[in-house]
Amino acid sequence: MSTSTRPSFGALIFFAVSFALGTYFTFAAVQGDYGLFRRVEIAAERDMLSRRLAELEGQIDQMENLTRRLSDDYLDLDLLDEQARSVLGLLRADEIVIR
């Protein structure tokens, strides 16, 4: 009798399937929808959106301040003068305009 050191066909299939599944799951862990690269993209997008949110909140605060300053309860004469000049094009009688 001769002893053969060749692995059986079933063992080869088992290792091939195991290798293929391992490769697939490794690829999915890195490149997939929930993989490492996607996490980095989501973190970068989160940081960008956080900066944009802070910028928009600053603009909202500025608009709320201007709105409050133009309200009936609070009248800022400098702001009123600025708005009259820029929006309505008004000037005082003692001013000279150079174009």
Image (spheres, rainbow, N blue to C red):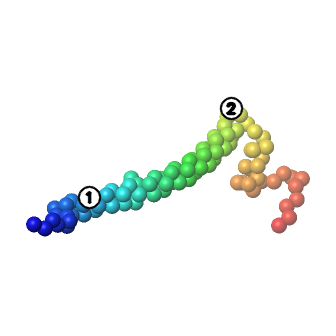
Of the 4 image quadrants, the one containing the N terminus is bottom left
The image shows residue 44 at horizontal and vertical percentages of 53, 54
Labelled disc at residue 18: 1
Q: What type is the residue that disc 1 sits on?
A: Ser
Q: Is residue 1 visible?
A: yes
- What is the distance, in whole Å, between disc 1 and disc 2 at their CAs? 75 Å
The image shows residue 51 at horizontal and vertical percentages of 59, 49
Labelled disc at residue 73: 2
The image shows residue 27 at horizontal and vertical percentages of 37, 60
Q: Residue at x 75, y 44 (%)?
A: 79
Q: What type is the residue that disc 2 sits on?
A: Asp
Q: Residue at x 79, y 43 (%)?
A: 78
Labelled disc at residue 99: none
In terms of depth relative to the viewer, which is nearer, 51 or 33?
A: 33
Q: Is residue 56 visible?
A: no
Horizontal side of 40 relative to 72 (left or right) equals left
Which of the two marks, 1 or 2, is nearer to us in this view?
Answer: 1
Q: Residue at x 75, y 39 (%)?
A: 76
In terms of depth relative to the viewer, which is nearer, 78 or 1?
A: 1
Residue 57 lies, with reference to residue 33, above or below; the image says above
Q: Name the secondary structure under disc 1.
A: helix
The disc, 1 or 2, on the residue closer to the chain's N-terminal end is 1
Horizontal side of 31 relative to 46 (left or right) equals left
The image shows residue 88 at horizontal and vertical percentages of 72, 54
Horizontal side of 61 relative to 44 (left or right) equals right
Q: Residue at x 86, y 64 (%)?
A: 98
Residue 70 lies, with reference to residue 89, above or below; the image says above
- The quarter holding residue 99 reads bottom right
